[in-house]
Each structure stands twice: as C-alpha cells, then as structure tokens.
Amino acid sequence: MISGSLPYIFEPSHQWLGVDGSWSTFTVSVGIPPQEFQILPATNVQETWVPLPQACAQFGPSCPYLRGVPVSSSSLGFDTGQSTTWSRDGIYDLVSEQNLGYDGNGLYGSDTVQLGNSTQNGPRLEHQVVAGIVDDGFWLGIFGLGPKPANFSSFNDPQPSFMRTLVDQKLIPSLSYGYTAGAKYTSSTGTVGSLTLGGYDSSRFTPNNVSFSFASDDSRSLTVGLQSIAASNTLQGDVTPLTTGILSLIDSTVPHIWLPPSACEIFEHAFGLTYDNTTDLYLVNSTIHSRLLVLNPTVTFKLGNDLSSGPTVSISLPYGAFNLEAHYPIYSSNSSNSSINYFPLRRAANESQYTLGRTFLQEAYVIADYERSNFSVAQAILTSPLPPRLIVPILSLNATTQRSPSAPLSIQSHELSIGIIAAIGILSTIFLLVTILVAICLYRRHRNLHTPNRQLNAKNWLKARRRSDTQRWVRELVAENPKCPPMSEHPAWRDPQWSKDSPKPWTWVRRQELPGCTAEQELEGGWASPVVSPSAESSPWQRGFLELPGHEARSKRGSARAEQLRSNLGALIG
C-alpha cells in the first residue's frame, strides 16, 4: 500500500532560453520577498545558482532577461540586499564541472528557495544553500538535483541539499527524480522538459529493462558504459564514430557531448563540421546545414552497465538535437541578436571528460534513485500533443512497498501511479454506493412483492371460497334440507312460464348473496369460515387469509336479504 507524501511535479516555465542553445527552463524564487529566475535542472550540482546583478554589468540591456530574470522585473539579478532572509557564507569555487574547464566563483549563502513563482504553491524551504554567480560559463541559473550536502568552513556542519530537505520534511516520498530536458526542435512551440521529484512521469519515455548502478565516485554517480555510437544517413552514409566502449557521465549541467578525439574526427567528416580553435566548438556552415536538414541523419548511443556486454539500451537523436545556435557572448564579434549554427560536440582531453550533456537529454529520460543507488535511461517521448501524465512514486526504503529494497529500479515494472491510485479509490467508492443502492432496491422490491402477493392470494382464496360456498349452500338448501325438496321436483321448475315470470330467486342467490355454509348463517348475514371462527380477531396473516371488513354493515344487508330469501323459499316449497 502506498502512503505518505506524493511526488512533486516541477512545472516547466514554457520559456526557451540559452546562449548555447534553446533550453526548456523552470522557475525558482529566491529570498523574501521572492526574486524569480528561470533556471535549468542540473543532475551534477547540489545547490541553487542564480546570476548576480554584476553578471550583466558589461552586457547590454537585454542581458538580465537572457540570464533568466523576468522581463517584468527591473532587477539585473539576485539582489542579496533586498532579501530579508539572506545569510552570507562567503565566496567559494564552483566545484562542479571543473574537470571540463568551467572555472568560476560563487557568492555563497543561505536563503529561502521556492519552486515555481511566488503565486504558485510550490515547496518553499528556508536556509537553503544559494550561490550568486557572474561567470559566463553558467549563463543561466541552476537548480541542483544532487543529494550531497554543502560544506563551507567545516565538514562538521554540512548544509543539506534542497532534495534532501524535501525528503526530510516528507514533501516527496524519496530521494529520487525523473528528468528529460525537452526539445525545441520538435515543433514551433517545442516539447517542454519534464521534472518530477520523488518519482517519474512514465508517459514521457519508452520503458526498458536495463538498470544502471551508481558509480563508486559520488561526483559521477550517473556514469554509463557507452558501448558504441552509430550514425545513419549522414553525408557519408552510415558511420560508426565509436566502436570501443568508454565510461561516460550523464550530466545536464553542461550542454555538450564530450567524446574521444578519434570519435570527433569521424563526426567531422560525416557531418561536414568545421572546428573552431578559439571556442573549441564545431561549426556548421549554411550549405552543410541545409544538406543535413534534408538528410536528417540519426545518431544512436548504445548504453550498458559495462563497456562491451550485458543488457543495453539505445537512445537515438535526430539531427535536430544537434542543430544548435550559439549566441553572444560566446562569439564576441556577434551582436546579441545574431547567432551561428554549431554542433554540440567537444573533444575530451582525457577519460574524466567523457560526458553526455543536456543535448543527449533532449531525447533521453533519466530516473535517478539515490536511496537504492541505481538509475535508468530510456528513450524520451516527444509526441505532440504529449500524452496525459502518469506520475509514478518511487518509495523510500523506509516505506512499506511490495518491491524489495535491494531490487534495482526498473522503468518497466512500475508501482501504481497516482492517477491509478486515485481511480481505484473513486471506483471503489462508486462500487460501494451502487451496491448499497442495489441492496435497497432489492429489499423494497422484495417487500412490495411479498405483501401484495399475500393479499392477492387471500382475495383469490376468498373469491374461490365464495363461489364454492354459494353453490354448496344452494345444494344443501334445496337438496339436503328436508324442508327444501329438489328444485327439479317442484312444479314451478317444470313450468316454462315460471322461468319467464318468476323472480328466479335461485339465480339471484348464486350471483349476489353472501356465501355461507348453512342457511342459518346466511340468514343472519354473517359468513362462517370452515377453518377459523368469525369471532376470532387475530391478525389476517396469522389466520392465513384476510378477514372481510365491516361485519356489522354486512349483517344489516344480510337481514334484508334474509327476509326476501324467506319469501322466495316459501314460494318454492309452498
């Protein structure tokens, strides 16, 4: 049974920002009063990073917006002096991504952080680690998905991450998430990213049976065995840039894909790329770009737990995923309104730089479970319109669950989703109500059918008894009573004129006189049952039939009829 907190759906802002591509952003609010920023989820960072006003000091007036500050705001960045809850810790290195050459410092402190804007009901946590940044390498702010605590002056005072605090405050069921970066190239509006904290959205990927274990180095937890890379329909047809497996880190903090130089060289020829020594980026001229748009080549990454064997999953990226634009200030000679096409491929200097960045996560969905130390990668679903969400909780190891805690996370064998749980509850309630209504209807029907049937049976029985008793009374009166000879022997019976002129008392008796067993009872105006005495006043159900009501009224009518009967009988036997 699933109980406790539910996953949190971190809604995307539906804005696409970035100087190294168009990326689906999310909104966070920092400080009191809240200051809003468009940020990118980072799988290899633990803190929240937002640009400081100094980050736009040397750029044009559009810089704040390009760095994630809302257009409606007059702010240039995170103003620590305007936040009443800001507490400064000091300036420290931005440790993440230093192996890729990303250098920079951050103004670290603690403040209130809320997911979403100030009008949304997102989680708001106090005393969260926040870094104000000015470095151009991290153009947009970052929301860290990592669970590790931050340490500043001492390792004896670790500051918990936002994700850890969510779990500790029981705002999400476990230390886990599901994320895909979204893809702007799928349509005019693009397919926005998806981020679920404490679970995942199973409607956003194609399931598979492959599960990956975390790497022993906790700074590179999401490491996979990249066994091969194959590209089809390129300028040179089908090529295989990577045939020997490498260990590569999945990291949405950076935009690019970092591969061995030998693999990059094959990409250069197959896609007509030009290497720029100044920026270390691969550029695509307009002619090649047009040809690639027509060819629409596909690049497939084959992932496994090791370098060459075991279960694998393949993630395919169309050319659109690599068709990115670099904006100012990456190319200082360009204005802020111009861009240049580039291919997000980088030459790795060593094995520590092998990385599958945000470009890869446009077409991949990753589910990370930090409590079980495993994760999954699947092909993302980018259909338009997107299917309805199907959110699946990942339960904590401390929660009651049918899945063994040691079992690896599988994105094919899901626990019940929130929608299914709600549907089961609603259907159960409806079923219970319908059952009660049916029971009430059956009870009323049984009662209504039972009572009229007994009344109807009693009435039918009485009618039959009346006919039988009337006929028997006539027979007794005429044939058995010594004073009453049979009618067939009476002279008037044989006289045809009698039948025409007489009042036909015998006929009148059969049709209209009250039934009775003897002439005396009939003359007295009562009716004597052969079973129960007429004096008994017990319930009609106890007697087995209904007693005729109104005995006294019938007695009066019976007396008048008795006088007429005596007169007629006298005529018959006299």
Image (cartoon, rainbow, N blue to C red):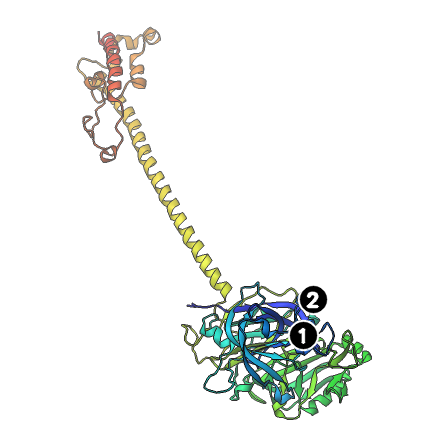
277 lies above or below 297 = below
Classed neighbour count for the residue bearing mark 1: other residues with Cα under 10 Å, few (<14), some (14–19), many (≥20): many
Residue 439, position in %: x, y? 38, 48
Q: Residue pushed farthest front?
A: 81
Which of the two labelled residues, at mark 1 and mark 2, occupies the earlier sequence position? 1
The amino acid on which the numbered mark 2 sits, given as a three-letter code, is: Thr
> Label 2 belongs to which residue?
189
Asked if residue 261 lies left or right of residue 27, the reply is right
Residue 456, position in %: x, y? 33, 33
Asked if residue 86 lies left or right of residue 382, the reply is left
For residue 175, say whether it is visible: no
Tell me the residue at 29%/14% (across/down): 506
For residue 72, say whether it is visible: yes
240 lies above or below 415 = below
> Label 1 belongs to which residue?
67
Which quadrant holds residue 518? top left
Residue 357, position in %: x, y? 64, 81
Q: Residue pushed farthest right?
A: 287
Mark-to-mark CA distance, 1 and 2: 20 Å
The amino acid on which the numbered mark 1 sits, given as a three-letter code, is: Arg
Picture quarter with the C terminus: top left
Residue 62, position in %: x, y? 72, 72
SS assignment at label 1: loop
* Closest to the observer, 566 or 432: 432
Tell me the residue at 26%/32% (across/down): 545
32 lies above or below 101 = above
**Circle on res. 328:** none
SS assignment at label 2: loop
